[in-house]
Amino acid sequence: MLDSHFFSFSDGTLCCESVRLDELAAQFGTPLFVTSRQSLVSQYRAFEEAFASLPHFTCYSVKANFNLSVIRAL
């Protein structure tokens, strides 16, 4: 299932935030793990809003995914 806000098809090619994934695969090789920064930040904000009325401290598990770009986005 595609998150239609951040992943889409353009001229029959899968894209993430308007970036063609076939071009990323050609540049970086496969397998390739692609994350939508906008989707990640959107989901994080939704989580924070859900708990806004409660005292909390949200921490990202670096062991779950040590991708520095993901960590910087959060």
Image (cartoon, helix red, strand yellow):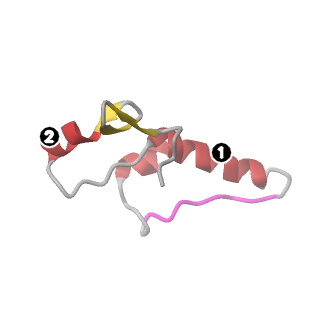
In this rendering, position of residue 8 left or right of residue 57: left
For this view, does 30 lie left or right of residue 3? left
Nearest the viewer among 64 and 21 is 21
Nearest to the eye among marks 1 and 2: give it: 2
State the image quarter where residue 65 is shown: bottom left
- In-front residue for pair 1/71: 1
Residue extent of the magenta highlight: 55-62
Q: Is residue 74 above or below residue 6?
A: below
Residue farthest along the right direction in this orientation? 53
Question: For mark 2, what is the residue?
Answer: 27
Q: CA distance from mark 1 to mark 2?
A: 31 Å
Residue of label 1: 45
Counting from the top left corner in percent of width and height, residue 14 is at: 33, 41
Q: Is residue 32 left or right of residue 70?
A: left
Which amino acid type is shown beneath numbered disc 2? Gln
Amino acid under disc 1 = Arg
Residue 57, horizontal then vertical, whole percent: 69, 58
Give the tally of numbered discs: 2
**SS for callout 2:** helix
What residue sits 19% from the left and 45% below the top?
25
The residue depicted at 68 percent of the width and 53 percent of the height is: 47
Residue in front for this viewpoint, 27 or 71: 27
Give the numbered dot on residue 69: none
| Horizontal and vertical percent position of residue 30 | 17, 55
Vertically, is 16 above or below 50?
Answer: above
Residue positioned 22% across, 41% down in the render: 22
Residue 9 falls left or right of residue 21: right
Identify which residue is drawn at 53% across, 38% down.
5
Q: Locate residue 67, reporting x and y percent.
A: 35, 55
Q: Earlier in the sequence, mark 1 or mark 2?
A: 2
Q: Secondary structure at mark 1?
A: helix
Crowd class of label 2 (few under 14; some 14 to 19; many from 20; radius 10 Å): few
